[in-house]
Image (cartoon, helix red, strand yellow):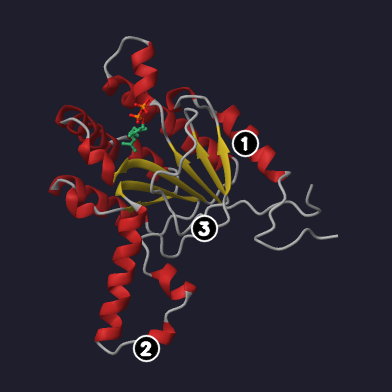
Amino acid sequence: MSSEENKLEHIAIIMDGNGRWAKKRGLPRTMGHRKGAETVKEICKAAEKAGIKYLTLYAFSTENWKRSEEEVSALMDLLRQYLKSDLKEIQERGVCIRFIGERQMLAPDIIENMAKLEEETAKNDKMTLCVALSYGSRQEIVHAAQRLSEMVRRGDIAVDDIDEKLFSNMLYTQGIPDPDILIRTSGEQRISNYLLWQMAYTEFFFTDALWPDFNEKMLLEIIDSYKSRERRYGKIKAE
Ligand code: FPP
């Protein structure tokens, strides 16, 4: 047990298992995503209630573009609906909404609504909900390296000016503290190209629950268990 309680500002989640949830019930995979979208609403509310300042959800990875056209298009339609109704509701509760990822891959109407939501919620400070869409962490790191190289080429910075802080500022997550907790549902124990730079010292929690079955009680149990973990950040144990 650590003597001081661990700081907890940011929870990142890999919402996995929608497809299996649907399959178990003989339903199409898209029904799993639909139910998963309901869980997003519940968990967002629960995180706000628990005083979490940042919640980052992996909604669609760059690799997810390789799924069937039918599934990708169903996910995009769900996203369209989400942008219009559910995220609006979340916005009205004073939550700031941000998107991370390669948004140029998305349809123009989606990009437009994302930008609108970000703009309208920029000053909200109850919590920041960060949605990773068309997101891949390696791509994000490559993109940051390209931006820095360009700055050096232009003579705006010297190579020696590049440090961890400047590098972090080139990532999509600029200004967002690193996650304290990562949760992955559905029993898989991988990080799947998610926030690789940002999770250097994050505490990982894996649960067998499929994302549509994940709930507030499970979230609170993880938070409780996190509080008693000892975070050492590479240092030796304090006497
Ligand atoms: C992983 O389950 C889930 C996804 C790839 C999509 C996540 C999307 C949602 C939770 C709903 C939409 C949310 C928003 C914000 C629009 P999987 O399909 O990989 O499940 P499986 O591993 O059981 O096949």
Instruction: Give the residue displayed 68% in from the left and 38% down from the top.
Output: 224
Q: Amino acid at mark 2?
A: Ala
Disc 2 from disc 3: Cα separation: 26 Å
Q: Earlier in the sequence, mark 1 or mark 3?
A: 3
Tell me: residue 57, above or below residue 180.
above
Closest to the observer, 6 or 20? 20
Q: Earlier in the sequence, mark 1 or mark 2?
A: 2
Quadrant of the rendered image containing residue 65: top left
Q: Position of residue 173 (x, y in %)?
A: 40, 60
Closest to the observer, 194 or 114? 194
Secondary structure, mark 1, is: helix
Secondary structure, mark 2, is: loop
Disc 2 designates what residue?
A: 158
Q: Look at the numbered disc 3 and say if its residue's Cβ is closer than 8 Å to ligand 1.
A: no
Disc 2: CA contacts within 10 A as few (<14), some (14-19) or many (>=20): few
Disc 3 designates what residue?
A: 178
Secondary structure, mark 3, is: loop
Disc 1 designates what residue?
A: 222
